[in-house]
Amino acid sequence: MSKADVKQLYETYGQNMCLAPFFNSFYSTCGIVNPNETAVNHVRPCSVIQAGTQWNIVNENITESRNTDLWQTVRQSFLNGNLPDLCQTCINAERYGSSSPRQLNNEYLFEHLDVDIIGELQRIIDSNLYADKVYAIDYMPSNFCNYACVMCYSGASSQRYTFELKQGRSIKYEINPVDSDFFDIIQDVKILGFTGGETILQPEVMRLIDYAIEHGLAHDMIITVLTNASDFPDSIIEKFKKFKRVLYTVSIDGVGDVIEYQRRGAKWPAVEANAIKIHNTLAVDEIVNHVVTSINILSAMDFVNWCRDNDFKFISVSNVFQPYLGMSALPPELKELALQRLQAGRQEYEQYADEYQSYKRNWLNTVDLLIATVKNSTFDPQALTQFVQHIKTEDLVSKKPLREVVPEWAPWFL
């Protein structure tokens, strides 16, 4: 099958259908809680659906937790043609003209999952919406990370956790063992994703990779790794060769000072060198993910041009979770400037579009996604106020203040 076959899904169940609550799971064994509380493992349909205690593990059993009334309600909502209120990330992305995680995941499963998707979906429906298998699981074992990105939070970064403690937050971080049926579930998993935290720095990730190899699961399993490209050890390459396929997503939100500001702790020369090294490694298929913010949108063409110059074939564009770091914080004059730069860049790429191989059109498509993201946004003065307050705090510990990294923002920080 190919991702184009996703049309079968939409023809059968409507354009709002999402496979995540039927096929996927985001499973976390770590958490941030108040000092007098205990962190509980949780499992929810995907990483971007609204979090909360309603997704907590029931009776130390993942399968049981995936079939609670809430999961059933979410599944039925999609079958009814509706995006649940819990899915605000996808709702907003589609409202602003961007590809949503829902759409991308549907395409992703049709492209990579060696399963009769329509048939399996019907089997779940015929079983009163009870899903006994997990075909694609994203596993978050810890928040261990060497970055403190300005759009991150303590639960996803140990560096960010330390930063928030220094800011006076009274919180506690805990890591728990996996639940009772975790290794039973792994037997059926076809796509195993690792997230965090910085994935390749987490011992739990390496242990599970070794487990899949030692138990004969790797040859029939795709693994996905989300990384900040701060490192790419040679020792992991031999392990990757044991798997059916490795999809290695590298987060690059800009070049030079821009990425070093947005992803605090990044060193651009190292990130660039590792991204190119990954790109040239036959054991992996690399995807470059670009998180769009009001910080990097004014220099977005520098990023696109860098992808072109280094022949990166696959690029995805993601919207930042926090609205006050997104396009709604852009004052009208900066929005207009961002559009001018993107449209000028688009003209340059468009004149060569017919000469490009199909994958090279991704550069033009990336510019179009960025333009749509800016065009479809609405300025919110309150978001701008929050943005300025947030950046003033970040500037206290950043190598350079934002007004020096992105001079266009300087008038708002005088």
Image (cartoon, rainbow, N blue to C red):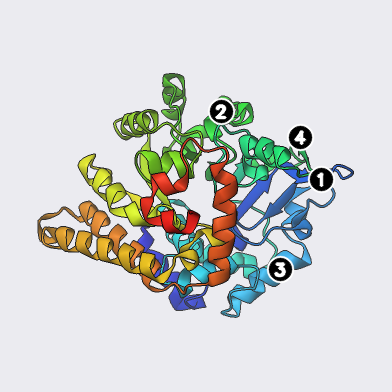
Q: Is residue 37 above or below residue 208?
A: below
Q: Secondary structure at mark 2?
A: helix
Q: Residue at x 74, y 61 (%)?
A: 67
Closer to viewer: mark 2 or mark 3: 2
Residue 204 is situated, as x and y percent measured from the top left of the image, at 64, 30
Residue placed under numbered mark 1 in the picture: 60
Mark closer to the chain start, 2 or 4: 4
What residue does disc 2 label? 201
Q: Amino acid at mark 3?
A: Gln
Kindly identify the residue that appears in the image at 63 percent across and 41 percent down.
140
Query: Which label is found at residue 155?
Result: none
- Earlier-in-chain disc, 4 versus 3: 3
Q: Is residue 375 left or right of residue 105?
A: left
Q: Which mark is residue 72?
A: 3
The local secondary structure at tag 3 comes to helix
**Label 2 – label 3 distance at C-alpha:** 36 Å
Mark linked to residue 177: 4
- Quadrant of the image for the N terminus? bottom left
Nearer to me, 119 or 301: 301
Marks 4 & 3, CB-CB < 8 Å contact: no
Q: For the residues marked 1 and 3, what is the alpha-carbon distance in whole angstroms?
A: 19 Å
Q: How far apart, in angstroms, are the residues tagged by discs 4 and 1? A: 10 Å
**In the rendered structure, which disc, 1 or 2, sits on the residue that comes first in sequence?**
1
